[in-house]
Image (cartoon, helix red, strand yellow):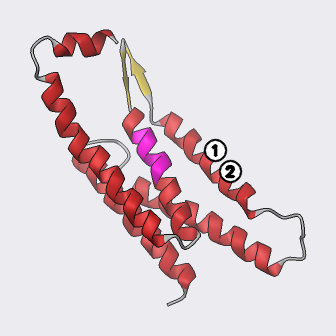
Amino acid sequence: MSNVYMSLILAMILGMILGMERFLAHKTAGMRTYALISIGSAMFVIISQIVVGQSNFYNFDPMRIAAQVVAASGFLGVGAIFHNDQKISGITTASGLWVSAGIGMACGFGLYKIAFFVTLLALVVFVALWFIEKKIRNIPGMDKEINSL
């Protein structure tokens, strides 16, 4: 199978893995959202590399497209952040979407080891740090301190 298709499939799988945790945590953005963002990011990187290889444009910089992927994923992430009363929610989901875009870009550039490693790190953040935060919130009086910040 071509490296292009392997990159896209890997981006989808790694995005789905992150999205699965969000789905299990009952968040709005889940497996499909994360997978699509990761695939789309990989696709734009791959397209930029193909265009550079096939074009006569000497001033074409594929990193411009990669930079726009970062900007677009940030825009999507902002849509995941909600503000109700005095509580803000969705910031972790927005951050996860942004990381998912980076994972897709890594797959698109063929940086598979980095994509796998970042997926593992993101899962540590999503899962392990959730348990640590939960334990900290259970410390008497700590919930008031956290909410006052």
Q: Is residue 4 visible?
A: yes
Question: Helix or strand or loop: what does disc 2 sit on?
Answer: helix
Q: Which residues are magenta?
A: 93-99
Q: Is residue 88 shown left or right of residue 104? A: left
Judging by the rendered image, the residue that carries numbered circle 2 is 68
The residue most toward the bottom is 1
Relative image position of residue 60 (x, y in whole percent): 84, 64
Residue at the spot x=54%, y=88% of the render? 2
Q: Residue at x 54, y 42 (%)?
A: 76
Whole-percent x, y for residue 5 in the image: 52, 81
In this image, 40 relative to 89: left or right?
Answer: right
CA separation, marks 1 and 2? 5 Å
Relative to 102, is 85 above or below?
above
Q: Which mark is residue 4?
A: none
Magenta stretch contains residue 129: no
- Given the image, on which type of amino acid does mark 1 rest? Ala
Residue 95: say if magenta.
yes
Question: Against 90, is 128 above or below?
Answer: below
Q: Which residue is mark 1?
A: 71
Residue 19 picture location, percent across and down: 34, 54
Nearer the observer, 92 or 145: 145
User: Residue 56, relative to residue 144: is it above or below?
Assistant: below
Where does residue 3 sit, x and y in percent of width and height?
Answer: 54, 83
Instruction: Give the residue drawn at x 55%, y 73%.
Output: 110
For the C terminus, give its image quadrant.
Answer: top left
- Residue 25 seen from this side: no
Q: Quadrant of residue 144?
A: top left
Q: Residues within 10 Å of mark 1 (few under 14, many from 20)?
A: few
* Relative side of 77 to 65, left or right: left
- Towards the viewer: 146 or 91: 146
Kindly identify the residue that appears in the image at 30 percent across and 52 percent down. Answer: 123
